[in-house]
Amino acid sequence: MRRHSFGHSSGRSCDHSLGHSAPDRTRHAFEPGKLVAGLVILGMAAAYGMDAAGEWDVRPEIALPALLGGLCVAALTSALTYALRRRSRRATPEEGVAEGGG
């Protein structure tokens, strides 16, 4: 029985001895905008689930603007995160630039 693993092509061996470094795909940057969007959508799903169970009365006139407002907050969070990361990348000195001077 053959086992398959995700992320590796079958039949090929990975040879990293050629001097090429493979990117580390086990970690990724934290993205707070996606977290906010996910929480907003989960909250809306919970509200409609409670409505279906008969516990709450969710009116679309309130729920849909709340969803759109939450997604706008998520977009603003993503934009601020992008701006801060871009700003911090610019603040770090590049390699080899200004070592001597003169």
Image: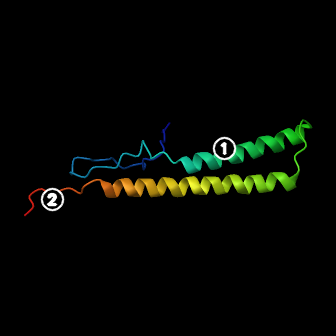
Label located before the other in sequence (1 or 2): 1
The percent position of residue 7, horizontal first and vertical second, equals 45, 47
Q: Say few, some or many: other residues with alpha carbon within 10 Å of mark 2 (under 14 / 14 to 19 / 20 or more).
A: few
Quarter of the image for residue 75 reads: bottom right
Q: How is the image coloured?
A: rainbow
Percent from the top left, x then y, of residue 73? 64, 53
| Residue position for label 1 | 39
SS class, disc 1: helix
Q: Name the element at disc 2.
A: loop
As rendered, which of 61 and 51 lies closer to the eye? 61
**Residue topped by disc 2:** 98
Residue nearest the viewer, comparing 51 with 63? 63
> Residue at coordinates 37% horizontally, 53% vertically from top-left?
88
Residue 47 spot, x, y in % from top left = 81, 42
User: Which marked residue is nearer to the observer: mark 1 or mark 2?
Assistant: 2
- Locate residue 74 relative to residue 52 in the image: left or right: left
Residue at position x 64%, y 46% from top? 38
Labels 1 & 2 near each other (Cβ < 8 A): no
Question: Residue 20, which numbered label?
Answer: none
Above or below, comparing residue 56 to residue 85 in the picture: above
Q: Is residue 41 left or right of residue 87?
A: right
Query: What residue is shown at x 92% (from left), y 37% (from top)?
Result: 54
* Left or right: 33, with 30 as reference point: right
Q: Amino acid at mark 2?
A: Ala
Nearer the observer, 19 or 38: 38
Q: Count the marks: how many?
A: 2
Badge 1: how crowded within 10 Å, few (<14), some, or many (20+)?
Answer: some
Q: CA distance from mark 1 to mark 2?
A: 45 Å
Q: Amino acid at mark 1?
A: Leu
| Above or below, comparing residue 18 to residue 3 in the picture | below
> Which of the image's four quarters has the C terminus?
bottom left
